Amino acid sequence: MKARLPQRCFARGVAALEAALTLGLAAFMVPCLIVLGNVLRQRLVLETVAYQSARQLAVLPRPQMSKSAGYQEAEARIRAQAMAALGGAGIDTSEVTFLADCPRGFCGSASLPQQVQVRLVATVHASAWGPAVGWLIGSQGLELRAVAVLRYEN
């Protein structure tokens, strides 16, 4: 007849197995949550900066909006402010594209636009968070886009 092992040995083995499974799952989930939180924060910053830039363009005075040189000067100033805000928020501005456009009308011409649009596109690379979470984003990076369209008010 076989000798029975005490019940405590099985309880220790089950506890060790549960701990291994829980720690393994936590080791996978924590980096995922950190990367997701950082990507969502960067997306929110992009959207906020795009909206603020479009708002500044939407309230440009008519004389400045109707002249090409005045509009280009204002757009350059707004672009610099947007890049400074993105840099201050910790976003790498070397791969950020800023595009200001007037979908209905021409910015900087005598025919005033009805709308102004600002597009921001940023590429987030895994190197920002290290190799431990690089596999989540991939080698190409993750492209974040923000578009703000506002009516020209002046």
Image (cartoon, grey):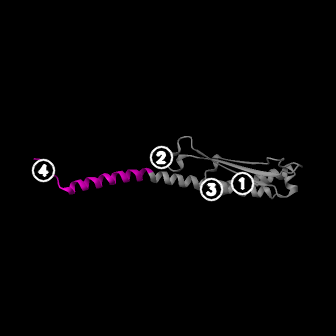
Where does label 2 land, which residue?
131
In reply to whether residue 9 is colored magenta, the answer given is: yes
Q: CA distance from mark 4 to mark 2?
A: 51 Å
Q: Nearer the viewer, mark 4 or mark 3?
A: 4
Q: CA distance from mark 1 to mark 3?
A: 19 Å
Q: Amino acid at mark 3?
A: Leu
Who's the residue at 78% across and 55% down the image? 57
Q: What x and y, as percent, mark residue 52?
A: 72, 58
Counting residues from the start of the chain, the first of labels 1 and 3 encountered is: 3
Q: Amino acid at mark 2?
A: Pro
Q: Nearer the viewer, mark 4 or mark 1?
A: 4
Q: Nearer the viewer, mark 2 or mark 3?
A: 3
Counting residues from the start of the chain, the first of labels 1 and 2 encountered is: 1
Residue sticking out furthest to the front: 1
Where does label 3 land, which residue?
44
Who's the residue at 41% across and 53% down the image? 26
Magenta-colored segment: predominant secondary structure: helix
Q: Quadrant of the C terminus?
A: bottom right
Q: CA distance from mark 4 to mark 3?
A: 64 Å
Decide if residue 78 is on the left or right side of residue 63: left
Q: CA distance from mark 4 to mark 1?
A: 79 Å
Q: Amino acid at mark 4?
A: Ala
Where does label 1 land, which residue?
80
Q: Amino acid at mark 1?
A: Ala
| Disc marking residue 3 | 4
Q: Nearer the viewer, mark 4 or mark 2?
A: 4
Who's the residue at 51% across and 50% down the image? 129
Magenta stretch in the rendered image: 1-28
Decide if residue 42 is on the left or right side of residue 31: right
Q: Nearer the viewer, mark 1 or mark 2?
A: 2
